[in-house]
Image (spheres, coloured by chain):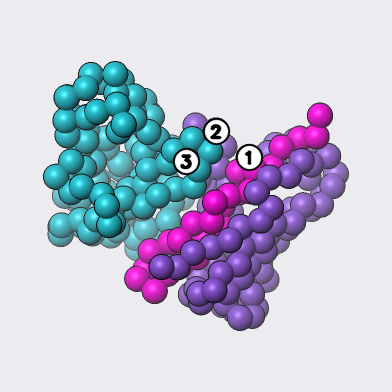
Chain colours: A purple, B cyan
Amino acid sequence: GQQLNQSPQSMFIQEGEDVSMNCTSSSIFNTWLWYKQEPGEGPVLLIALYKAGELTSNGRLTAQFGITRKDSFLNISASIPSDVGIYFCAGGGSQGNLIFGKGTKLSVKP
Amino acid sequence: GAVVSQHPSWVICKSGTSVKIECRSLDFQATTMFWYRQFPKQSLMLMATSNEGSKATYEQGVEKDKFLINHASLTLSTLTVTSAHPEDSSFYICSASGYKTASHYEQYFGPGTRLTVT
């Protein structure tokens, strides 16, 4: 079946740093979405991408739909403490469902 | 916009009893609702997809007689965990997509329900 490889699995941020994470797959997806989940809550949709090559921003977040339709990345610029959480990529599958990556956990450097 | 609520937010039940979880789309009509299960520190696992007025489609390995799903209206879907056992303890999250969402791929999630079976 379709699977996504999301990396990194976890990362520590210092306030002000830029953050980058990505998802890759051997399968082609029609849509890429990025979600953020905080403990004990449901995921919140951050950015949705619909076309290969599309680059979309939402405030300090920027995401791109890879030209091959097999990958996507999410960048967070000038990170702030409230950016901590788990970020999931999701690819829109051939059956209208979403395939989720395993998540990237963002924590604050001690 | 695109707000989804879930009730209850947490529930504790005894082994052998049934538990019903409600998922509502508050400001849009959800043609499709999805039910996920999430174990600690893991990703979301799709359990089933339900379209309003029709039977749910269950993912492989999910027992449809144990996890009963009803999507009776465009704003409400329910998941009933029947004869719950401790191994059913988990975080259950619903999501919805519909007429208001830009794409049927855009799913908006509820806040989740923490089920603990003792």
Whether residue B95 is in magenta: the answer is: no
Please say whether residue B40 is visible from this viewpoint. Answer: yes
Q: Residue at x 20, y 47 (%)?
A: B63
Mark 3 lies on residue: A42
Labels 1 and 3: the sequence-earlier one: 3
Labels 1 and 2: the sequence-earlier one: 2
A104 over A62 or under it: above or below: above
> How far from the left and from the top, in percent, is residue B86?
29, 26
Disc 1 from disc 3: Cα separation: 12 Å
Q: Residue at x 36, y 47 (%)?
A: B36
Kindly indicate whether the residue at mark 2 contacts the one at mark 1 (C-beta within 8 angstroms).
yes
Mark 2 lies on residue: A39
Q: Is residue B5 left or right of residue B76?
A: right
- Figure label count: 3
Discs 1 and 2 share one subunit: yes
Whether residue A101 is in magenta: the answer is: yes
**Magenta region: which residues?**
A86-110
**What residue type is disc 3 on?**
Gly
Q: Is residue B50 left or right of residue A6?
A: left
Kindly indicate whether the residue at mark 3 contacts the one at mark 1 (C-beta within 8 angstroms).
no
Disc 3 sits on a residue from what chain? Answer: A
Disc 2 sits on a residue from what chain? Answer: A
Q: Residue at x 79, y 41 (%)?
A: A13
